[in-house]
Image (tube, rainbow, N blue to C red):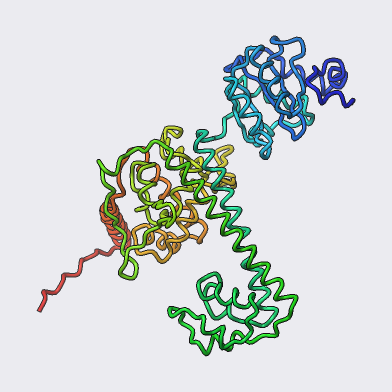
Amino acid sequence: MSKQKKHSKPLGEQKTAAGKGKRGRKRKGMCLEDRPSLEVNAAGIDIGAKEIYVAVPPDRDEHPVRVFSTFTEDLESMAKWLVSCGVTTVAMESTGVYWIPTYDVLEQHGVKPCLVDARGMKNVPGRRTDWHECQWLQYLHSVGLLRAAFRPDGEVCAVRSLMRHRSDLVQMTSQHIQHMQKALTQMNVQIHHVISDITGLTGLAIVDAIGDGQRDPVELAKLRDRRIHASEETIRKSLVGNWRPEHLFTLKQSRQMYQHYQTQIAACDEEIEKLLVAFQPRVDPAEKPLPPDRKKKQHGRKKKNVNPKTGFELRTESYKLFGVDLTQIPGLMAMVLTLFSEVGRDMSRWPTAGHFVSWLALCPDNDISGGRVLWRGVRRVHNRAGDLFRLAAYTLHNDQSPLGDYLRRMKSKMDAPAATTSTAHKIAIIFYTMVKNQVEYDISLWAQRDAEREKRLEAKLKRQAQRLGYKLVPIEEKPAA
């Protein structure tokens, strides 16, 4: 095929010739069959890195399939051509991040994009070329066989982009921490095995002193913070090494890179806070004060997640965003804003809590054929919000809360991953109910559910005893002396 196809020209004869074979006629016939359409003004786009293939209904243009480059001017021309063809909605495959510019241009021109998962259109064999792919997309979308993927509003998407970028910065930071530990190990300096965190006050003070040229273990041990459990003598012994110059150079550079990424994370946090405070709050804390924190205080003092520079307080800002205090849900304290960036605060996108947890892939699915269950389990999809709920459930193993009790009870019945998913399912339902119905977390409901569960267990034991010919007699409590 000639290189001229990169311009926004109709494919015309060259594509018609490509489809003259038996399989080509069959594909073309299937796309043009007169079948009932739910979206009569639907188009399809096959997304690529350098060019996109666009198909409109065959009766809208002499050349219903065209190819456009991915330059901004070509995307504008593509959107204008779709509008001139009377197209109101377009289906496109979610290919990496290449779909984002096309999505934005279509929205600006009043065309509704429909971002679809590739698995929803790969069930039929064939259509391996871009020209056939866009036609197949257009046909499936016109007959209502494609479901649009969830994408939050534009303001929430901006927060989501920065939150994901911040997550990448944190991962890069952890790599340089590992580099510092590796350099210390190669010099047989065991300080990172004596203290719990090398990036704490004591660890960074010692690493900075080593970078400045200090080699005396006695002087380095004096930098120990008073809250460190290890004694000064133990720290002194761990700071005796061989001080190889190449490892010292690696240690110094890794420390500088760690500091650089910490600065970038702080700048990213400030930018995220600017976007969050710009949202219209659902509740005014002055009129409806923040409910009291029902969580137990740790070590006799209340811990607050406040940015010392900007005064941004996590609990208060999340309360203003959602209208309810989601930080009271066990496990979600540090994930509320991340969840906001992934799902937003408009729960009307999901009719019920069941739809919400199904989208999160936190509920079991099955494959039934001929009355037999062929497969049953959780769908293997990558959902960032679902992963957050799983992480929240994973942290509750030692938590003395009803959700923590539920996780431990589920672990006694099934394997750990299944128990974590089951607990994440329950946390997601609580999250959905609180945000949609604007109700606060009520821990007293758990006592009622536990009482009902005890009654069911008692009735089950009575039935089993009766089946075996026994009768359960409750033990009378002895009066207190």
Above or below, 337 against 89 in this view is below
Front residue of 126/255: it is: 255
- Quarter location, residue 111: top right
Residue farthest along the right direction in this orientation? 2
Above or below, 339 against 468 in this view is above
In percent of width and height, residue 177 lies at 61, 67
In percent of width and height, residue 465 lies at 30, 62
Q: How many labels does the image show?
A: 0
Horizontal side, residue 448 vs residue 376: left or right: left
Front residue of 105/24: it is: 105
Residue found at x 30% / y 46%:
440
Horizontal side, residue 234 vs residue 455: left or right: right
Front residue of 465/294: it is: 294
In percent of width and height, residue 85 lies at 66, 12
Front residue of 295/24: it is: 295
- Quarter location, residue 118: top right
Residue found at x 63% / y 73%:
181
Tell me the quadrant of the picture where the N terminus can be found.
top right
Above or below, 185 against 281 in this view is below
Tell me the quadrant of the picture where the C terminus can be found.
bottom left
Above or below, 302 against 45 in this view is below
Horizontal side, residue 276 vs residue 42: left or right: left
Residue farthest along the front direction in this orientation? 212
